[in-house]
Amino acid sequence: MSRLYLYGITRPRDVPERIRSQGISLVVDEGRAAVVSELGEGPIEATRRNLLAHADIVEQLHEETVVLPARFGYVLENREDALELLALPEIESLLERHERTCELTLRGTYEESVLAEIGAGLKSLRDAYAVAPSVDAGIALGEAVGEALHDRRARDASLVLDAVGPLVLEFVTGEPAGELAAFDLALLVERDRVEAIETRLEELAGRLSPPLHFKLVGPLPPYSFVRLALPVVA
Amino acid sequence: MQRESSQGYITRAPRSSGLADVLEILLDRGLVIDAYVRVSLVGIELLTVDLRVVIASVDTYLRFAEAVNRLDLRAVDDSKSVPDLINKGGEEMAETKTKGAVEGGMDAIREKIGLGGRGDDDEDDEENSGSRSRGGSNDR
């Protein structure tokens, strides 16, 4: 019996035919199903192709129904393992919780002009560096810029959360990646509120841009909101 | 797949469109079921290298300093349209706070990049105040 690669968990009645025709099969336990494909021996390669395929399957499912997307790389040894997983009460409650939800990821990035704004508030350090551009003066200035940028990030992230908070069920704050990254948020929202959120963000972006630019991705499966509180198994 | 919103302030994508989005989401998030399955992956290390940039490095600070120095600050200084960041109270606070942190961290940084020892501190202060007034007169 071959091992099963796990994409996620869903409601079997809503799985469209086109998914089944992509080499995907379901292990069904009453109203719950593990979305899997058969896998040979050996490790799973985290290649671009495999990652995108995984995302594609769960995102296609999400267009039709609720799906709890698995993190990349999970393998079930056999059908029994899959059934055991599906029988967990936590799985049923997560499926119920996410019946009508979706995730939006919102990233903020600054244009370089934010540095000019920040620099305007750091006149003495800037002057010191302009007159004698030593390493020390550079670090002192750069560090002050970094700190001001840090405060600016916190401020802008909370402006965003204030604006969309009332429309959001839950949110997760990620670590912004990159020097000019402002924030990285995952928002859990009702599917029918996506448009309302987009409108609010549009208004806010109008006020904060430039230098802040938003990137909004979704509606996605609730990737960031499917934490299982599992008992520790010996 | 990706588009700009009507006013162009938001880049909008209905699905995780690029590898970077997907990487972050699939490797970092999603259902975790360690108690029930065995996992063995290859290749992740390669993919995740450089995914995150460490902000608090000397390198970054010097680049920030360069950028701030290079950008046309005069225009911003005089502008009335630049929002709250320049408003007085905040600026003073930020500068005082920053100064403490900068001086506190200096020795550690000097050590790190192999610059001279403690004796430099006093000279630095003199240099700073000197250049501050020179800088000030330049602006007028």
Image (tube, coloured by chain):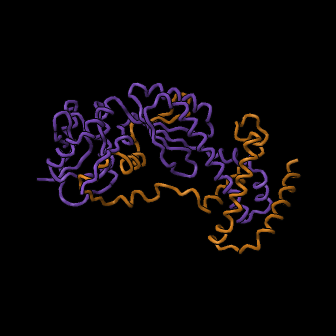
Chain colours: A purple, B orange
Q: Please provide percent x and percent y for residue A111.
A: 61, 44
Question: Residue B13 sits in which quadrant?
Answer: top left
Q: Please provide percent x and percent y for residue B100.
A: 71, 57
Question: Residue B133 sits in which quadrant?
Answer: bottom right
Of A221 and B34, which appears nearest the observer? B34
Q: Is residue B41 left or right of residue B16?
A: left
- Which residue occupies 66% across, 63% down? B105
Of B64 and A10, which appears nearest the observer? A10
Q: Is residue A140 above or below residue A191?
A: below
Residue A120 is at least partly visible in this image? no
Q: Is residue B72 left or right of residue B29?
A: right
Q: Please provide percent x and percent y for residue A204.
A: 58, 31
- Which residue occupies 68% across, 54% down? A144
Of B69 and A174, which appears nearest the observer? A174
Question: Residue A205 sits in which quadrant?
Answer: top right
Which quadrant is the C terminus of chain A positioned in? Answer: bottom left
Residue A179 is at least partly visible in this image? yes
Q: Please provide percent x and percent y for residue A63.
A: 31, 32
How many numbered tags mark residues here? 0
- Which residue occupies 79% across, 53% down? A124
- Which residue occupies 43% across, 26% down? A193
